Amino acid sequence: MQKPNDRLAGQTCIVTGSSNGIGSAIAKAIGQEGANVVVNYHSDKEGAEETADWIAKNSNCGEALVIGGDVSKEADVSELFKKTVAEFGTVHISIGNAGLQQDHALHEMKLEDWQQVIDVNLTGQFLTARAAIKEFLKRGMRPELSNALGKIICISSVHEVIPWAGRANYATSKGGLKMLMQSICQEYAPKKIRCNSIAPGAIKTDINKDVWSTEEGKKKMLKLIPYGRIGEPSDIGSVASWLASDESDYINGTTLFVDGGMTCYPGFTQNG
Ligand code: NAD
């Protein structure tokens, strides 16, 4: 972890699904930059509290607050923002990280497996971004804190561009997220809102533990990564904290691929 440098001091950030994995690393990186961080969790309250404790110990000036809630439920997202505003006054940065997979061959995929992934990975991003934009517009500019009225970061995936057999629900949710993110940018950039995505490649978390935790799975995974290592959650955390800061002020409506070169399709290296 880098040393704190308070690039986000005075700002408040919500990170959805941040009790573990990539979300927890993002919450910690944002906390180290001095922001107040809301650690949202779905079921792992203990993990969320550990993340919040870490932030309390490692931030110079930010505070951490744990709030439960399911991002696919309109009432939960509304409550998440209401409680955040009640505690910290407003929201400056909203990071939609919550996501899941329900893998099945398409001809065997139940409607509920399709629906759950779309509900969490795509509708959850819509609900979170909508609540954030409403709050940004209500608050108005605070130029002493940021050049932007607000920042939205969507955690997408390399599968917003790489098709994925056996996971059509997941790839579709992330492909749709690309259009949601860009449409938000087109609509709200004139109001000084920045909306971008981060697309991780293979990052070591619970979501893909069954693959990287065996030698054979790890070898297969590494074949897809030209840079020769599996990513760590902190690889995404450091990019997210920079993308939330004014150092990236001119970046809007784009996806940053953080994937060790996975989207350069290494399978073609010897087959051109
Ligand atoms: P993870 O399973 O460790 O974490 C996912 C988090 O989302 C968990 O905290 C979970 O509780 C939360 N969540 C799930 N459903 C929720 C809901 N309805 N409401 C609120 N929270 C909910 O996996 P991760 O790898 O840390 O994934 C984080 C994000 O990164 C996801 O959007 C995932 O699609 C994306 N991603 C991960 C990888 C990777 O290789 N790990 C690659 C590309 C994209």
Image (tube, rainbow, N blue to C red):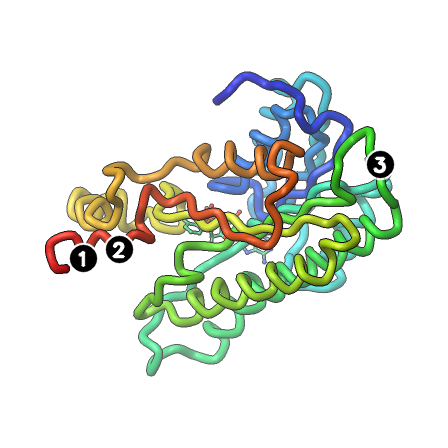
Q: How many numbered marks does the figure carry?
A: 3
- Tell me where residue 177 appears, x and y as whole percent: 55, 63
Tags 1 and 2 touching, CB below 8 Å: yes
Quick check: 116 left or right of 5? Answer: left
Q: CA distance from mark 1 to mark 3?
A: 48 Å
Identified at 73% across, 64% down, the residue is 74
Identify the residue under disc 2. Answer: 265
Residue occupying the point 61% across, 24% down? 32
Q: Which residue is mark 3?
A: 142
Seen at 56% across and 66% down, the residue is 179
Name the residue rendered at 31%, 75% in the picture: 105
Sequence-first tag of 3 and 2: 3
Tell me residue 122's x, y (percent): 57, 64
Crowding at dot 3, Cα within 10 Å, few <14 / some 14-19 / many 20+, comes out as few
User: What percent of the width, then of the height, locates residue 40?
Assistant: 64, 45
Mark linked to residue 268: 1
